[in-house]
């Protein structure tokens, strides 16, 4: 039986990367002029909640991220994340008994073909982890594979901007000890892991994988050093092949196998499509490859039949979106391009389904090289469309993501991040005012920290990665108090409570708001 139209629609605003830290030093949020945010914080019930580590299904000490955050928020329960699942599988030894991988490796050996490992090589833990590379290399050694190549994508975003040397030195040492494997190419993630359809970047990475890059050096370490000389930090190091003048570049050839070592899908999809899809037309591929086996650590696209996921996704039943659809309620998801998958696919539990009664608004992100060049991004356009949606009075529940604190925070540019926060504050004022005018209620929170720490105190580099800091939880509505020790998985049950709906049994989070009516 559908629920009747509620008197109090609810809006969830997720300020991506908007963490809390008391210290004002190198804190873009504390240093920004944010009158609307400060007024709301001082007037309404608020607290802080946990958004990282075991509170969101990650290992202790592991910072949260947008994918994990939105999964937990939308699911209303703590979901054991891929990093934890894969770590446990390796630790138990089951990883080294994977028959599908073993059979594929045996086929490569029989046909004298190569194995190529692609992926982000760091211990950032957001998209991948170097320990998983080491486990895959161990399995290749166990299967007596002779020809194994690594195409390492450099981080500098979930790790310090200039930290790649230590990771590549660690990889070189590991390969030497293992007696197999060679680094074939290096590429900054800016190129190989674009997710915003900036295809010229992907094309450069694709060409390095399939043809070889015009930039080449003898040793992988030199690729990084030469990049630094060009004033490129890890993330931006141009695709570089590793070979001598007399040698050909090591590339993916027909019949070779690929294992993509990223477990997070969003930044792995575009390069995967370029390598696999026959109908691909985003750029002209000078060389098309017939790959014998294309493995991904996790499922990147449930509609892709050409790749095989080593670890299957966890099914999430009765996520917030699915549940309120069953109740006959109308909902809206809105974000700009950079965070659109998070308020849709990830918020829906990693499900591509658009539920009945679910509308979506995508606002294009600005086409700039890095977002410190346009700190406001598309926040004003998101706010404008969101205000119109609120005033339409069509929706029982709205979920909005503002990307600025995270995406500008990732640039490490403090002044730009401060400008981003001030633009964000204007948007918060407009949107909350619109909700108040129709008698609605608002929860403002974040999925993880970032912009509250813009310098790494240990190495004095810009701090471009996420943090493990707590995040704000602000309720703009009736008189209330907030329960302590909340976590992201408590947000969906809290929204349902405000909407006058019971939470489904699958949701194990708790309502955080005690109304004082």
Image: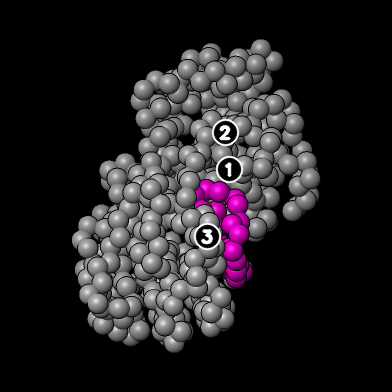
Upstream in sequence: badge 2 or badge 1: 1
Upstream in sequence: badge 1 or badge 3: 3
For image coordinates 65% across by 58% down, the residue present is: 197
Within the magenta stretch, is there residue 337?
A: yes
In the picture of the structure, the residue carrying the numbered disc 2 is 309
For image coordinates 41% across by 39% down, the residue present is: 83
In the image, the segment drawn in magenta is 336-365
Q: Is residue 454 visible?
A: no
Position in image of residue 458 (x %, y %)? 25, 54
Question: What crowding class fits label 2: few (fewer than 14 Cα within 10 Å), some (14-19), or many (20 or more)?
Answer: some
Q: Quadrant of residue 73?
A: bottom left
Residues at marks 2 and 1 touching, judged by CB atoms closer than 8 Å = yes
Residues 156 and 382: in front is 382
| Residue 327 located left or right of residue 258 | left
Question: What crowding class fits label 1: few (fewer than 14 Cα within 10 Å), some (14-19), or many (20 or more)?
Answer: many
In the picture of the structure, the residue carrying the numbered disc 3 is 1
- Residue 300's label in the rendered image is 1
Tell me the distance, in whole angstroms, between the alpha carbons under discs 1 and 3.
36 Å
Disc 2 secondary structure class = strand
Q: Is residue 177 visible?
A: yes
Tell me the distance, in whole angstroms, between the alpha carbons under discs 2 and 1.
8 Å
Question: Is the residue 160 above or below the residue 484 in the image?
Answer: above
Upstream in sequence: badge 2 or badge 3: 3
| Residue 26 located left or right of residue 219 | left
Total numbered circles: 3
Question: Is the residue 50 above or below the residue 452 in the image?
Answer: above
Question: Is the residue 497 above or below the residue 423 in the image?
Answer: above
Tell me the distance, in whole angstroms, between the alpha carbons under discs 2 and 3.
39 Å
Position in image of residue 272 (x %, y %)? 64, 42
């Amino acid at each position: 039986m559908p629920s009747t139209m509620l008197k109090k629609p609810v809006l969830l605003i997720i300020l991506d990367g908007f963490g809390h830290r008391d210290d004002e030093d190198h804190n873009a949020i504390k240093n920004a002029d944010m009158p609307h945010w400060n007024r709301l914080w001082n007037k309404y019930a608020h607290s802080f909640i946990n958004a990282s580590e075991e509170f969101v299904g990650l290992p202790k000490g592991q910072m949260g991220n947008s994918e994990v955050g939105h999964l937990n928020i939308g699911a209303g329960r703590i979901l054991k994340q891929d990093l934890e699942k894969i770590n446990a599988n390796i630790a138990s030894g089951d990883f080294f008994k994977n028959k599908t991988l073993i059979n594929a490796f045996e086929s490569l050996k029989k046909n004298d073909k190569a194995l190529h490992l692609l992926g982000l090589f760091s211990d950032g833990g957001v998209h991948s982890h170097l320990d998983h590379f080491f486990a895959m290399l161990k399995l290749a050694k166990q299967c007596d594979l002779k020809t194994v190549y690594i195409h390492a994508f450099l981080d500098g975003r979930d790790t310090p901007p200039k930290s790649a040397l230590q990771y590549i030195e660690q990889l070189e040492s590991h390969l030497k000890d293992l007696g197999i494997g060679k680094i074939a190419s290096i590429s900054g993630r800016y190129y190989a892991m674009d997710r915003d359809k900036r295809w010229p970047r992907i094309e450069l990475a694709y060409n390095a994988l399939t043809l070889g890059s015009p930039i080449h050096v003898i040793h992988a370490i030199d690729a990084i050093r030469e990049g630094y000389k060009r004033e490129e930090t890890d993330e931006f190091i141009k695709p570089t092949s590793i070979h001598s003048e007399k040698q050909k570049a090591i590339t993916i050839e027909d019949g070779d196998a690929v294992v993509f070592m990223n477990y997070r899908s969003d930044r792995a999809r575009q390069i995967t499509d370029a390598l696999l899809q026959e109908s691909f037309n985003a750029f002209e591929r000078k060389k098309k490859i017939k790959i014998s086996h294309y493995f991904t650590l996790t499922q990147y696209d449930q509609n892709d039949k050409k790749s095989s996921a080593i670890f299957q996704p966890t099914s999430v039943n009765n996520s917030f979106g699915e549940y309120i659809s069953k109740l006959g309620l109308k909902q809206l998801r809105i974000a700009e391009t950079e965070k659109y998958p998070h308020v849709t696919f990830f918020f829906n539990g990693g499900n591509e389904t658009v539920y009945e009664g679910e509308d979506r608004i995508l606002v294009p992100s600005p086409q700039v090289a890095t977002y410190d060049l346009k700190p406001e991004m598309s926040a004003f356009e998101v706010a404008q469309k969101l205000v119109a949606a609120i005033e339409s009075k069509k929706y029982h529940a709205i979920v909005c993501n503002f990307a600025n604190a995270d995406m500008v925070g990732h640039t490490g540019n403090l002044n730009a991040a401060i400008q981003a926060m001030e633009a964000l504050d204007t948007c918060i004022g407009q949107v909350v005012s619109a909700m108040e005018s129709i008698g609605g209620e608002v929860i403002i929170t974040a999925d993880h920290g970032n912009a509250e720490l813009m310098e790494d105190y240990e190495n004095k580099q810009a701090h471009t990665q996420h943090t493990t800091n707590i995040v704000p939880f602000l309720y703009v509505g009736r008189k209330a108090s907030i329960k302590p020790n909340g976590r992201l998985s408590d947000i969906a049950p809290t929204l349902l409570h405000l909407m006058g709906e019971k939470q489904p049994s699958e949701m194990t989070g708790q309502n955080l708001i005690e109304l004082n009516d």
